[in-house]
Image (spheres, grey):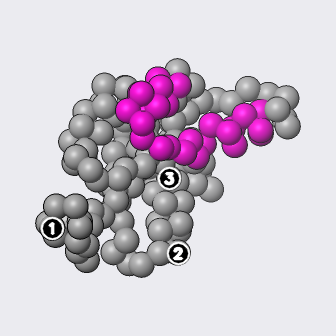
Amino acid sequence: MASLDLSTDEVVEDVKPIVLVVSDARGDTAYSVVVAAAAQFEVDAMDIARLADATSVEKVTKFLEEQNVEGRPMAVFHTFVDERLRRDVRHELVRRGIPSIDLLGPAVTVLSTLTGSEPSNKVGALRDRLVES
């Protein structure tokens, strides 16, 4: 779809937003949530790109730079069990002005408070538990 910028008489193409799914494991959980949310919109309303095994802020930063296209809206949905990595990635996203949602951290915090116990912070814990079942 194109629109006309009346100030320059140029045709400007609409840019499709991209949603980045980033995880320190495979990213299946985050990807499922993003795909479920995206199903509420037109099929081609957005692109989704995924980074699994994101074990450092440097790896995430490199992925952000690879996906960044000037003027293309971007958001990040992430799942990190490591609190420090979660914090560092969040700081990087805020610094870049990229909206993001931490899909795992708040849930783990609530469950930790509810149970009175500390989480294992084990990467891939859901996958391992499903394999055990």
Horizontal arrangement in the rendering, residue 10 relative to residue 124 (left or right) = left
Q: Counting residues from the N terminus, which is met first, the one under dot 2 or under dot 3?
A: 3
Q: Counting residues from the N terminus, which is met first, the one under dot 1 or under dot 3?
A: 1
Q: Amino acid at mark 2?
A: Gln
Q: Which residues are magenta?
A: 87-112
Return the residue nearer the eye: 81 or 100.
100
Q: Which residue lies under the disc numbered 1?
A: 9
Image position of 10 with respect to 56: above or below: below
Horizontal arrangement in the rendering, residue 55 relative to residue 120 (left or right) = left
Instruction: Classify the position of the N terminus by image quarter.
Output: bottom left
* Residue 86 in magenta stretch: no
Q: Counting residues from the N terminus, which is met first, the one under dot 2 or under dot 1?
A: 1
The nearer-to-camera label among 2 and 1 is: 1
- Callout 1: SS: loop
The nearer-to-camera label among 2 and 3 is: 2
Q: Which residue lies under the disc numbered 2?
A: 40
Q: Which residue lies under the disc numbered 3?
A: 30
Residues tagged 2 and 1 counted as in contact (Cβ below 8 A): no
Rounded to the nearest angstrom, the CA distance separating label 2 from label 3 is 16 Å
Instruction: Classify the position of the C terminus by image quarter.
Output: bottom right
Q: In which quarter of the view is residue 112 placed? A: top right
Q: Amino acid at mark 3?
A: Ala
* Residue 106 in magenta stretch: yes
- Give residue 101's mark: none
